[in-house]
């Protein structure tokens, strides 16, 4: 009797809060957080950065405003990323960041106590403890229910691949903290790899190269600007150059160096080689029937890292499988989460198992 009453009260409160709140899908990325609102589309695309006052513990800024502070703050203010390699590294700050995004989405509707259903994209290789940390952070931030979906599955759905059918679909999602490689069929992941080598590691490669080759110390933001401006994985028809400014490690004075696309390619080669080797490993583990589908349909690239010039061509050369970059790869995961949200009952089997029950606790 008690169980029936609890179930009924949950349903009533769920319907009540459901009418007042908007269901949201979140791509909780190491570099950027994107938020999809059911019925409205992508409403938020901001950096996953939080600025904190260490003396008072107060949150000073979140998102774009906080990213502007990176590397430019006094000692008592720190601009930090609460997620490292796609997982929660600072629980309390992640909770505050999620609360900020949930409240921002509900500002227009004048909802005093937003309690939305939240669907969050997570890397496929994270542990049960790390999954629980994401769910707890979402529930504490004000979610009524919290569900998880693996990022390669969300990216495949975002690319409108037939993930429910008995066909092989291969997705490579290169984000900020992790690279997700997965073969999907019948709504499940058949073979996968989750690497802690992605956009952030590529930035570190560029910082290391500048230090070793030019005796020049550059910041993370400068390294990312270089990667975006002239980064490539395959020789380009037109040579590209970029003027970088940093501190000379010998004299300690400011210094400017002109860097070429060939040098950046050399700097990025280690990380790209690791990603390609893992793609080959996943291909080796894929059943032959699914592999024939992938040969026909090709490998789909998603995520910001896939925008590196010539990466699709290099992967195609190395694997002998056609490769194509999906439309708007940066928003692939959140678009997939949005498609699932629009019909969560029909697509519930693509979610990480048993999270619906945990979300009520």
Image (cartoon, grey):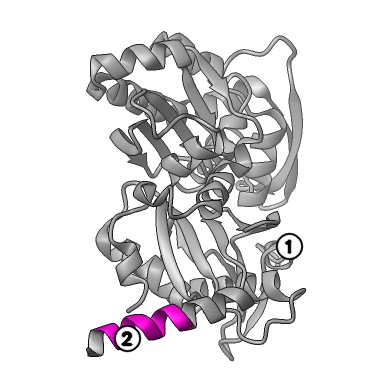
On the rendered image, what quadrant is the C terminus found in? bottom left
Q: In the rendered image, which residue does mark 2 sit on?
A: 6
By secondary structure, the bulk of the magenta-drawn segment is best described as helix
At mark 2, the secondary structure is: helix
Q: Position of residue 251 (x, y in %)?
A: 66, 49
Please check the rendered image and state whether residue 8 is part of the magenta-colored stretch, yes or no: yes
Query: Which residue is nearer to you in this view: 11 or 282?
Result: 11
Residue 316 coordinates in the image, percent (x, y):
48, 13
* Quarter location, residue 238: top right
Res 90 visible: no
Q: Is residue 253 above or below residue 243?
A: below
Can you give x and y, in whole percent of width and height, for residue 35 in the image?
Answer: 62, 58
Give the foreground label among 2 and 1: 2
How many residues crowd mark 2 within 10 Å: few (<14), some (14–19), many (20+)? few
Q: Does the magenta segment cover residue 320?
A: no
Q: Is residue 323 left or right of residue 254?
A: left
Classify 128 as above or below 228: below
157 relative position to 111: left or right? left
From the viewer's side, name the closer residue of 103 and 227.
Answer: 103
Q: Residue at x 63, y 78 (%)?
A: 20
**Residue 68 - label:** 1
Which residue is drawn at the image coordinates 57% and 16% (left, top)? 234
Q: Is residue 282 visible?
A: yes
**Image mark count:** 2
Q: Is residue 210 above or below residue 145?
A: above
Q: Which mark is residue 113?
A: none
Q: Residues within 10 Å of mark 1 (few under 14, many from 20)?
A: some
**Label 1 secondary element:** loop
| Residues shaded magenta | 4-12
Residue drawn at x 27%, y 83% as measured from the top left: 4
């Amino acid at each position: 009797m008690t169980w029936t009453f609890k179930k009924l009260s949950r349903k009533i409160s769920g319907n009540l809060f459901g009418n007042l709140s908007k269901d949201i899908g979140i791509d909780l990325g190491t570099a950027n957080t994107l938020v999809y609102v059911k019925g409205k589309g992508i409403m938020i695309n901001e950096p996953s950065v939080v600025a904190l006052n260490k003396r008072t513990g107060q949150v000073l800024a979140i998102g774009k405003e906080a990213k502007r502070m990176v590397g430019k703050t006094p000692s008592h203010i720190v601009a930090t990323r609460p997620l490292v390699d796609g997982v929660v590294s600072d629980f309390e700050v992640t909770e505050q960041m999620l609360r900020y995004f949930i409240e921002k989405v509900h500002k227009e509707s004048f909802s005093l106590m937003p309690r939305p259903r939240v669907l969050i994209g997570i890397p496929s290789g994270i542990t049960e403890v790390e999954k629980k940390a994401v769910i707890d952070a979402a529930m504490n931030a004000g979610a009524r229910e919290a569900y998880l979906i693996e990022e390669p599955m969300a990216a495949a759905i975002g690319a409108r691949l037939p993930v429910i059918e008995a066909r092989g679909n291969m997705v490579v999602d290169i984000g900020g903290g992790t690279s997700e490689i997965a073969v999907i069929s019948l709504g499940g992941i058949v073979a996968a790899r989750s690497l802690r080598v992605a956009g952030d590691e590529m930035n570190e490669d560029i910082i290391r190269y500048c230090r070793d080759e030019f005796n020049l110390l550059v910041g993370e933001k400068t390294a990312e600007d270089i990667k975006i401006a002239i980064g490539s994985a395959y020789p380009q028809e037109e040579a590209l150059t970029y003027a970088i400014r940093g501190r000379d490690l010998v004299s300690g004075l400011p210094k400017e160096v002109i860097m070429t696309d060939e040098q950046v390619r050399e700097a990025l080669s280690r990380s790209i080689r690791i990603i390609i080797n893992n793609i080959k490993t996943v291909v080796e583990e894929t059943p032959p029937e699914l592999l024939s589908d992938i040969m026909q349909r090709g490998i789909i690239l998603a995520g910001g890292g896939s925008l590196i010039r010539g990466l699709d061509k290099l992967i195609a050369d190395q694997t002998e499988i056609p490769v194509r970059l999906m439309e708007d790869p940066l928003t692939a995961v959140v678009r997939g989460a949005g498609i699932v949200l629009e019909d969560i009952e029909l697509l519930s089997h693509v979610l990480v198992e048993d999270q619906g029950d945990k979300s009520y606790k």
